Image (cartoon, rainbow, N blue to C red):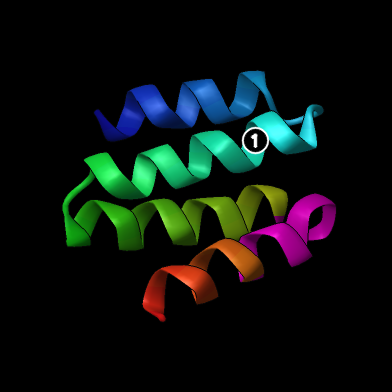
């Protein structure tokens, strides 16, 4: 499932609202371990492009 979500996120990376929606869905489906791995992967691949979005999604998840 994690690899599938990475493919999806790569495919929708240019559509910010859709990218956010897919990240949020991923966090619902994946185990904690996979969520952490996905978070690291997103930071590595999209931190420059979607830094604020990633911070928002992961901060709202922990609240």
User: Which quadrant of the figure contains the C terminus?
Assistant: bottom left
Residue at the spot x=39%, y=78% of the render?
62
**How many labels, in total?**
1
Relative to residue 54, is residue 35 drawn left or right? Answer: left
Residue 18 in the image: x percent, y percent? Answer: 66, 29
Q: Work out whether 28 lies above or below 1.
A: below
Label the magenta part by its dominant secondary structure. Answer: helix
Q: Work out whether 50 lies above or below 30.
A: below
Residue under label 1, please give it.
19
Residue 38 in the image: x percent, y percent? Answer: 40, 51
Foreground residue, 22 or 4? 22
Q: Secondary structure at mark 1?
A: helix
Residue at the spot x=71%, y=58% of the render?
53
- Residue 17 painted magenta: no
Residue 26 in the image: x percent, y percent? Answer: 37, 40
Foreground residue, 22 or 63? 63
- Which residues make up the magenta segment? 47-55
* Disc 1 crowd, CA 10 A, few/some/many (<14, 14-19, 20+): many
User: Which quadrant of the figure contains the N terminus?
Assistant: top left
Residue at the spot x=83%, y=50% of the render?
49
Foreground residue, 34 or 56? 56
Relative to residue 42, is residue 36 drawn left or right? Answer: left
């Amino acid at each position: 499932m994690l690899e599938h979500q990475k493919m999806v996120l790569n495919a929708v990376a240019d559509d910010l609202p859709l990218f956010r929606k897919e990240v949020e869905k991923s966090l619902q489906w994946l185990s904690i371990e996979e969520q952490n791995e996905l978070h690291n992967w997103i930071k590595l691949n999209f931190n420059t492009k979607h830094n604020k979005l990633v911070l928002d999604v992961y901060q709202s998840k922990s609240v």
